[in-house]
Amino acid sequence: MNDHQSLRAEFAKALAAAADRDALAALHAGWLGRKGRLQELFKQMKELPGPDRPAFGAAVNVLKEELEAAFMARQEAVRQAEGVRAVDLSLPGHAPAQGGLHPLQQVLDRITGIFTRMGFAVEDGPEVETEHHNFDMLNTPFWHPARMDSDSLYLVQGHMLRTETSPVQVRVMQEVAPPLRIIAPGRVYRNDKPDASHSPMFMQVEGLYVDHGVTFSDLKGTLLEFYRRMFGPQVKIRFRPHYFPFTEPSAEVDVSCIFCQGAGCRVCKHSGWLEMGGSGMVDPKVLEGVGLDTEEWTGFAFGLGVERMAMLLYGVDDIRLFYENDWRFLEQF
């Protein structure tokens, strides 16, 4: 038992001198390991007389428990001390990683910000629409190619995925009396095969203005102001006659190329113009369908593609990049 007391004192001295993990590991192996000093004590039991062995074994077990408890306490203290020393407060900190808005959301926010400052309210509507609101209320006849399965995505019981956000305009006109000045941003769906310039899902912003005496000149002035705020004061626009079922007269809107300022380049196919979307005066049949007197009220409507705008602003040549969720692409924005 006197030997046990001396072993305690010797272990305590060695334990206090172990100042790091390597020293503790060596101490554990020399004292508590399979070939350590405590194991040598257990081996001495066979040299003792039989009656003395139980007391000796019990004493060695008590000693082992004491040494292991002291070792665990010292090991935890060393770990905490090393953790404190590992922090160098003189080093500069690491800024946490920050997320960002998707590039399409950035462009959409920019578009809606411009229009709201011009007095337009932002309206929303269901992406699952009825054929009645998506086509009939917008003066689209049953024989129109847009109503074919090859162009539109139909569901059940007369429902479909909306092909444009124009049905939002119809729903608002049914519920709110004019004057109205709204935009309707959102996702739309077409039965298109994905490629560099087409996607079965994309985003549109439709605009509507209904009031007394609204003219085509108001439409031109509104879009000219928008595109100048979007791309710069040097931008020009032009209107090309076109056909849309829900506007009459109708026109495609072109913007002078923002890359070559109209001189002609690869982006604008050397024409000096970029096609941006459709527009026109709201067809009287659409106004009559929502109960408005066409002798009193007139209006204009327009639409533009968010992806198209983003591709021009950021120089992206493949629309699929916006939907593949490749972090290498998205982190650039």
Image (cartoon, helix red, strand yellow):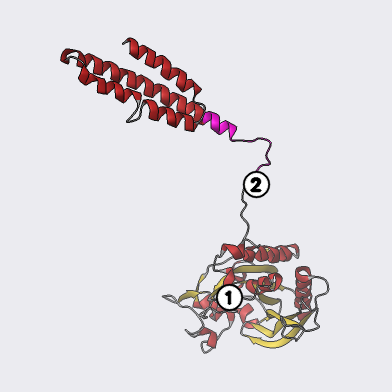
Q: Nearer the viewer, mark 2 or mark 1?
A: 2
- SS assignment at label 1: loop
Question: Within 10 Å of the Cα at label 2, are there few (<14), some (14-19), or many (20+) other Cα atoms?
Answer: few
Q: Position of residue 75 (x, y in %)?
A: 46, 28
Instruction: Name the residue carrying label 1.
Output: 164
Please give the label number shown on residue 203.
none
Start-end of magenta stretch: 80-95
Q: Is residue 93 magenta?
A: yes
Please tell me whether the stretch drawn in magenta is mainly helix, strand or loop.
loop
Examine the image and state in which quarter residue 302 appears: bottom right
Please provide percent x and percent y for residue 287: 64, 78
Q: Which residue is depicted at the point 67% across and 66% down?
A: 107
Of the residues under marks 2 and 1, which one precedes in the sequence? 2
Can residue 123 be seen in this snapshot? no
Seen from the viewer's position, the closer of residues 241 and 76 is: 76
Side of 319 where 161 appears, left or right: left
How far from the left and from the top, in percent, is residue 108?
65, 65
Location of residue 116 by image quarter:
bottom right
Q: Is residue 173 among what the camera can see?
A: yes
Nearest the eye: 99 or 215: 99
Task: Judge whether 239 appears above or below 112 on screen.
Answer: below
Q: Position of residue 191 (x, y in %)?
A: 50, 80
* Position of residue 309 in the picture relative to residue 322 (left or right): right
